[in-house]
Amino acid sequence: MTMTVSGAMGKYGFECVTSGGGNDNVIKDVYIGDLLSWVMGRAGEGCAWITIQAHINIVAVALLVEAACVIIAENAQVDEDTLTKANEENLPILKSKLTSYQIAALFARDE
């Protein structure tokens, strides 16, 4: 599977809550995880990381694993500090009302 972040937004209806930098990043895989230390050791480069975590530390973890984007599930509220830092780093943060499972299932249908 490969698609751009903007392609995923258009196809699946995700809302981009950052300024749009990095929307041409290529999504190569999907990873679901809420325990940051676990994600750091297991998420792969180019992944769309699905989580309900929405605090500033997700930006550091996403950059460390070289994620294509972060998708916040269940419309969890994203902190302003998180958005500011993500915009500085050109890290796309997307939101969805869907659960983590439902988001991953969208991607899985297209494999």
Image (cartoon, rainbow, N blue to C red):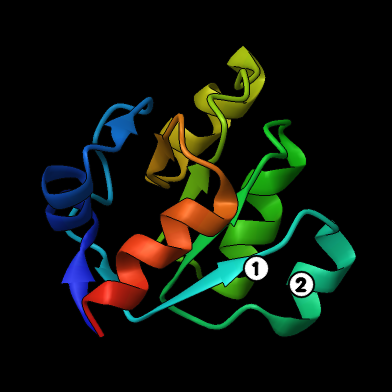
Report the disc number at residue 35.
Answer: none
Label 2 CA crowd tier, 10 Å (few <14, some 14–19, many 20+): some
Evaluate if marks 2 and 1 touch, with contact meaning CB atoms under 8 Å apart.
Answer: yes
Residue 40 location in percent, x, y? Answer: 76, 72
Residue under numbered circle 1: 64
Residue 28 location in percent, x, y? Answer: 34, 81
Q: Quadrant of residue 2?
A: bottom left
Q: Quadrant of residue 7?
A: bottom left
- Residue sitting at 38 percent across and 44 percent down? 92
- Residue sitting at 68 percent across and 46 percent down? 58
Is 108 placed left or right of 73 in the picture? Answer: left
- Residue sitting at 41 percent across and 65 percent down? 105
> Is residue 101 placed above or below 47 in the rendered structure?
above
Report the disc number at residue 40.
Answer: 2
- The type of residue carrying mark 1 is Leu
> Is residue 88 placed above or below 101 in the rendered structure?
above
- For the residue pair 70 and 106, the one nearer the viewer reads as 106
* Mark 2 or 1, nearer chain start: 2
Quadrant of the frame with the C terminus: bottom left
How far apart are the alpha carbons under marks 2 and 1?
Answer: 7 Å
Is 59 placed left or right of 46 in the picture? Answer: right
SS state under label 2: helix
- The type of residue carrying mark 2 is Met
Is 9 placed left or right of 58 in the picture? Answer: left
SS state under label 1: helix
